[in-house]
Image: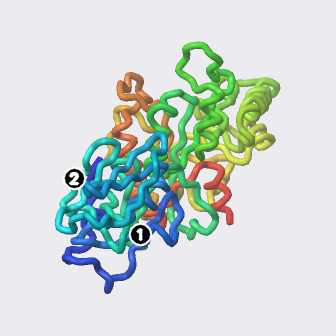
């Protein structure tokens, strides 16, 4: 998705013909971390440039310099022999540098530059060539490049709006299609798992334990969605209700260290269920088509602002996000399957999810802070 919105401006922040020094400095933020001495940004001919080695290696890629061909090679996979980026004595300073990423030349209106013995390349071409996200935060004059989920800390929340992407059922399409997009844009996520349907070698549509462990290690919150999800919790006896809540948590915590939140199945919820939920979980999400105040009025009865279906458009989802930004509220978006075929009502195509994630990233974390459910609760009450 090149040039998602004009506000990205990573490709055209200013229009001067040389490196700009009079304007306020541009901060480069890699996976939520800024201020690294070997990673910075410069504006060259109106384009944001970054030092190729520092940025590429932060994104898990290797770099090789071919002086004879004046070409910077960037590649993922097995590390190759490291080659210095220092100028060769035989190198012609007249011919432009080339950037080749995983065997494909990255074309840019402004070619790579050699500055003080280091190769600098356009930020957008490098990031997108490696499958990473890149966006411009105008208010903070920072370029964000991400290829992993960035869960916030307390210092990141300053009373702005928040947003949570909350996935129900524990479908394996999350692992295949949604997780890579959340990493690309650095946006946290919560997946609420039906503990009794975890894949155990059978061919089912649900996640298996190894996938869940990997997701957790990559920054995804694992929440509960009851043990069986066969009946609404309000229809159960006290004994069966306690089993659904207790056993789900117990099963999931044999896979990941902590399960602290729950998405209420079928959104069937009342005070009796809430009392039972409180014994095992710190927060509960229900669907009521409402935004949450910050802090929420009741962290054990939080609302989803929208339940996304394959009949919805980007503009409908954007409307709820913009509403949260305007009112500084917490927008929880409820999703299920992410599948190119989107055959079920509650399955959407990856392209729609990417458009939503890209929009959230483009707004900047100072306007709307992406959080998982438990982090949102923790930050909001401080």
Q: Which residue is mark 2?
A: 107
The mark found on residue 25 in the picture is none
Image position of 98 (left or right of 324): left
Image position of 200 (left or right of 40): right
Q: Quadrant of residue 344?
A: top left
Q: Quadrant of residue 159?
A: bottom right
Residue placed at 52% from the left, 55% from the top? 370
Residue placed at 50% from the left, 62% from the top? 161
Can residue 316 be seen in the rendering of this structure? Answer: no
Give above or below for 14 relative to 189.
below
Residue 104 spot, x, y in % from top left: 27, 43
Residue extending furthest toward the top: 202
Residue 302 spot, x, y in % from top left: 61, 48
Mark 2 Cα-neighbour bin, 10 Å: few <14, some 14–19, many ≥20:
few
Residue placed at 26% from the left, 56% from the top? 68
Give above or below for 324 relative to 102.
below
Give above or below for 313 relative to 2.
above
Residue placed at 65% from the left, 46% from the top? 301
Front label number (2 vs 1): 2
Can residue 324 be seen in the rendering of this structure? Answer: yes
The mark found on residue 142 in the picture is 1
Image position of 227 (left or right of 311): right
Q: Distance from label 2 to label 1 (Cα)?
A: 23 Å
């Amino acid at each position: 998705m090149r040039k998602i919105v004009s506000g990205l401006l990573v490709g055209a922040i200013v229009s001067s013909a040389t490196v700009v020094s009079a304007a306020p400095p541009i901060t480069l933020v890699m996976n939520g971390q800024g201020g690294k001495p070997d990673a910075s940004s410069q504006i060259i001919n109106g384009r944001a440039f970054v030092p190729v080695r520092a940025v590429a290696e932060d994104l898990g890629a290797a770099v090789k310099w071919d002086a004879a061909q004046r070409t910077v090679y960037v590649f993922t996979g097995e590390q190759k022999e490291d080659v210095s980026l220092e100028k060769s004595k035989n190198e012609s300073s007249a011919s432009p540098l080339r950037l080749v990423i995983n065997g494909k030349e990255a074309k840019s209106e402004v070619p790579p530059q050699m500055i003080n013995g280091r190769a600098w390349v356009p930020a957008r071409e490098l990031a997108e060539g490696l499958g990473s996200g890149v966006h411009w935060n105008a208010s903070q004059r920072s370029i964000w490049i991400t290829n992993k989920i960035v869960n916030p800390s307390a210092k990141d929340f300053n009373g702005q709006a928040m947003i949570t992407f909350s996935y129900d059922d524990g479908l394996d399409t999350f692992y295949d299609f949604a997780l890579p997009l959340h990493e690309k844009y650095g946006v946290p996520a919560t997946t609420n798992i039906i503990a009794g349907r975890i894949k155990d070698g059978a061919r089912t549509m649900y996640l298996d334990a190894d996938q869940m462990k990997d997701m957790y290690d990559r920054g995804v919150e694992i929440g509960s969605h009851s043990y069986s999800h066969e009946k609404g919790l309000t229809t159960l006896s006290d004994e069966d209700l306690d089993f659904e809540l207790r056993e789900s948590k117990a099963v999931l915590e044999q896979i990941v260290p902590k399960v602290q939140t729950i998405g209420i199945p079928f959104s069937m919820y009342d005070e009796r269920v809430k009392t039972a939920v409180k014994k095992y979980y710190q927060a509960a999400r229900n669907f009521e088509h409402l935004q949450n105040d910050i802090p929420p009025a009741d962290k054990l009865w939080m609302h989803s602002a929208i339940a996304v279906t394959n009949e919805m458009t980007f503009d409908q989802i954007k409307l709820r996000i913009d509403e949260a930004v305007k009112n500084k509220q917490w927008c929880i978006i409820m999703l299920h399957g992410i599948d190119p075929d989107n055959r079920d009502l509650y399955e959407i195509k990856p392209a729609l999810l990417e458009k939503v994630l890209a929009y959230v990233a483009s707004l900047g974390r100072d306007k709307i802070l992406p959080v998982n459910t438990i982090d949102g609760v923790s930050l909001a009450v401080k």
